[in-house]
Amino acid sequence: MHFWQTCCFWQILVPFSLMKQQFRYFPTNERQRDWGLYVTCAGHASYAADAPFPSHDHPDEYFFSWDIGRTLNEWQLVYVSAGGGIVDFENGRFPVKAGTLVVLTPGHWHRYRPHRRTGWTTSWFGFGGEAAKPLMGPMFFTRCGEVRTVENNPRFVQDFNRLVERLINDGAGMAFASAARIPLVISTLLEAGLETDAAMRRTDIVHRAQTLIAEHASEIVDFERLADSLGIPYRTLRYAFAKETDLSPLQYQLSIRLARAKNLLRSSDMPIAEIARTLGFNSPGHFSHFFRDKTGHSPAAYRKTSV
């Protein structure tokens, strides 16, 4: 193994039989930070099946163990070109396959690893600065990080790989020019299928929210906290629900209660007061008022007509 360091970068090549990687880390200076956009790192890595992960050759502030994970102070885009694995964010676990992009956001915990049976091949670059915030702000549906499919966006993959190669080969000597290429890479991701990607992410968010609401349908749900657990603002959750279901999250919860009430009235001899308590209503009167408003019948009348 060969290792060297200069004032401009770190580079390391590891010719292990189960792992091949090449990467650079770039210290930033005051002029770059004042400019507002700078590159922090770039690299390639290939891990064969059953290879140990992650490599211990990265600087301490970037290295992580699976048990602990890590939190970065920068954005990172990680493209998986072969194999597959998983990534954990604060809001859940997501599968990773070839042709996907893992987006790591500053200040949020994460961890990831390849599947032992497949390994994976990745390329990545990291960047930061005040200009990165508006650049990335409108791009992503969640705040904690995400996994996006880019296999049908060859222009993005081409621009992404060109930037990584440029950074590895000459990034230290062209710090400002290299950083200036980041908006180009981001723009190709935005321009290709943005509406489709947004709809897919919205559907996924709503499905996950529906599962959580169904699990707690008889309880008082704090929808602000639920949205926060999904990594989005509540107003975004309301918008996504309206687009996907024509309902608000609360209306969806009440629709679940109504469906369960109908089922209990049809299929059981449970007293109406007990049904009201089971479904989380304040009183039998509140339940009866709600049921009549939604169906046009009292619970007792609905039970008689359903026998």
Image (spheres, rainbow, N blue to C red):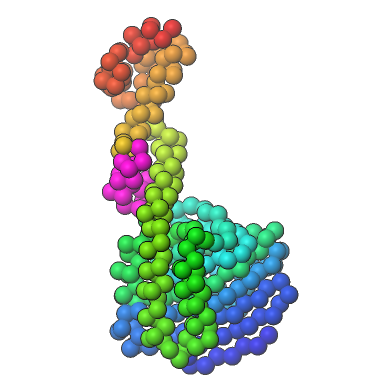
Above or below residue 118? Residue 288 is: above
**Residue nearest the viewer, comparing 243 with 52:** 243
**Residue nearest the viewer, comparing 287 with 86:** 86
Residue 258 seen in the current view: yes
Compared across the picture, whether 143 is left or right of 3 comes to left
Residue 155 pos. (x, y %): 46, 68
Q: Is residue 61 magenta?
A: no
Q: In which quarter of the image is the C terminus?
A: top left
Compared across the picture, whether 296 is left or right of 95 comes to left
Q: Which residue is drawn at 52% across and 57% down?
A: 88
**Residue nearest the viewer, comparing 143 with 223:** 143
* Quarter location, residue 120: bottom right
Residue 207 pos. (x, y %): 43, 42
Q: In which quarter of the image is the N terminus?
A: bottom right
Compared across the picture, whether 50 is left or right of 230 comes to right
* Quarter location, residue 247: top left
Total labels: the figure holds: 0
Q: Does the magenta stretch include residue 225?
A: yes
Q: Which residue is drawn at 57% across and 75% down?
A: 44
Above or below residue 276? Residue 233 is: below
- In magenta, the rendered stretch is 221-245
Residue 68 pos. (x, y %): 54, 63
Helix, strand or loop: magenta stretch: helix
Compared across the picture, whether 117 is left or right of 146 comes to right
Q: Which residue is drawn at 52% across and 67% down?
A: 79
Residue 213 pos. (x, y %): 40, 37
Q: Which residue is drawn at 34% across and 88% down?
A: 30
